[in-house]
Amino acid sequence: MNSNLPHLLLTRGLWLVRMDIWLIAALVLLMALGMLVLFSAGEHETDLLMKQGIRLGLAGGVAIVLAQIPPRVLRYWSPMIYLLALILLIAVLFIGVGRGAQRWLDFGVVRFQPSELMKLALPMTVAWLFHGQRLPPRWWLVLLALIIIALPVALIYKQPDLGTSILIGTSGIAVLFLAGISWRYIFAGGALAAMAAPALWFILKDYQRNRIRTFLDPTGDPLGEGWNIIQSQIAVGSGGFWGKGWMQGTQSHLEFLPESHTDFILAVLAEEFGLIGVLCLLLLYLLIAMRGFYIASQARDNYGRFLAGSLSLIFFVYVIVNAGMVSGMLPVVGVPLPLVSYGGTSAVTLMAGFGLVMSVHNHRRIWS
């Protein structure tokens, strides 16, 4: 028996399972920090921590598997994944389940939210559309991309889920931006959006209008709609520069702060670790996004460049939206803090996205 066999298996196995070590290290550090804050926000519930640990482990496994798939394979399947996600979104309108909104498909064993699949399918498909095309894209390609973006945005808005529809639309627009769309199109789109904004008020649902009113004046209903924002701002402000210390926060532990382990977990971190803790967390997010942008810049083709760039950009947009929501600078739209808030579906989607980013990195020197 070959005495070098264990060494060969180990080295060959490490060669076969390829990943970007810097990106993985930053993501693991982020998830570890999230578990630390979650343990405090979840009232020291070990069951909650174990469930989240299992979900994050699953999410990491998904990322590693996707990182091994060549971008040419991803590119080939992109439009078919988009069509599948679109069909599932249509099915949600008829057989979807959920409390107050139809956002899930329940298959008995599996309960699935198709909008999560679309978070990946949309940038993949718009990147596929522009692959091999002259850049900046011609007007008819821009129009076709906007139609591809508009279809899922409209379906998700109908669930209703305004926040997710806007963020998914942004992921598609990010590819347009990276493709070097002409500034006259950007200015024209911005002007049209500004002119349409007043009319959009009349098509918003009552709860969506209330969120905007609450954002503008949370003190108008301090014990009702404004409670979340007010308590979140108190938690953030009371942390000061250094914070009160781990597990020493009062707003979450005395149950003043709602959703302390999900959407408003950043307020818990701000109260316990202070401004310095928030800045360290934002720096870690920025490093992850910058690593993604670097991978995009090293991509072999436009598909990889647009895919890695858009996924990295939208990841950081999620961070900004959640931070703005917690601080009262943006309306509450139910966006969790990436890889820190409790939840499995969003974690799997985010890590799957980073798996696609690592795929671009792994195969940058290989024909793809």
Image (spheres, grey):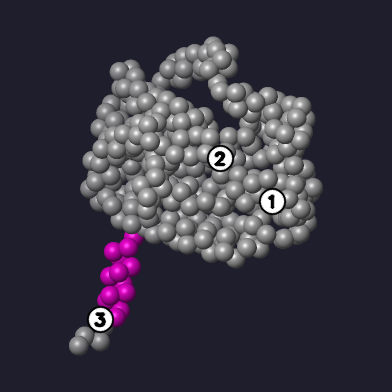
**Which of pointers 1 and 2 lies earlier in the amino acid sequence?**
1
The 10 Å Cα crowd at callout 1, few under 14, some 14 to 19, many 20 or more, is many
Q: Using the numbered discs, state the Cα–Cα distance from disc 3 to disc 1 in whole angstroms.
A: 50 Å
The residue depicted at 48 percent of the width and 39 percent of the height is 98
List x then y, in percent, for residue 286: 55, 46
Is 13 part of what is drawn in magenta? yes
* Residue 20 found in image quarter: bottom left
Q: Amino acid at mark 2?
A: Val
Marker disc for residue 335: 2
> Looking at the image, is 137 positioned above or below residue 232?
above
Front-lying residue, 351 or 46: 46
Whether residue 309 can be seen here:
no
**Which of pointers 3 and 2 lies earlier in the amino acid sequence?**
3
In the drawing, does residue 280 fall left or right of residue 55? right
Q: Amino acid at mark 1?
A: Val
The 10 Å Cα crowd at callout 3, few under 14, some 14 to 19, many 20 or more, is few
| Callout 3 touching callout 1 (CB < 8 Å) | no
Front-lying residue, 362 or 106: 106
The stretch in magenta equals 6-19
Marker disc for residue 78: none
Disc 3 target residue:
5
**Which of pointers 3 and 1 lies earlier in the amino acid sequence?**
3
In the drawing, does residue 3 fall left or right of residue 155? left
The residue depicted at 33 percent of the width and 42 percent of the height is 304
- In what element is the residue under mark 2? loop
List x then y, in percent, for residue 42: 64, 57
Q: Using the numbered discs, state the Cα–Cα distance from disc 1 to disc 2 in whole angstroms.
A: 16 Å
Disc 1 target residue:
268
Is 155 part of what is drawn in magenta? no
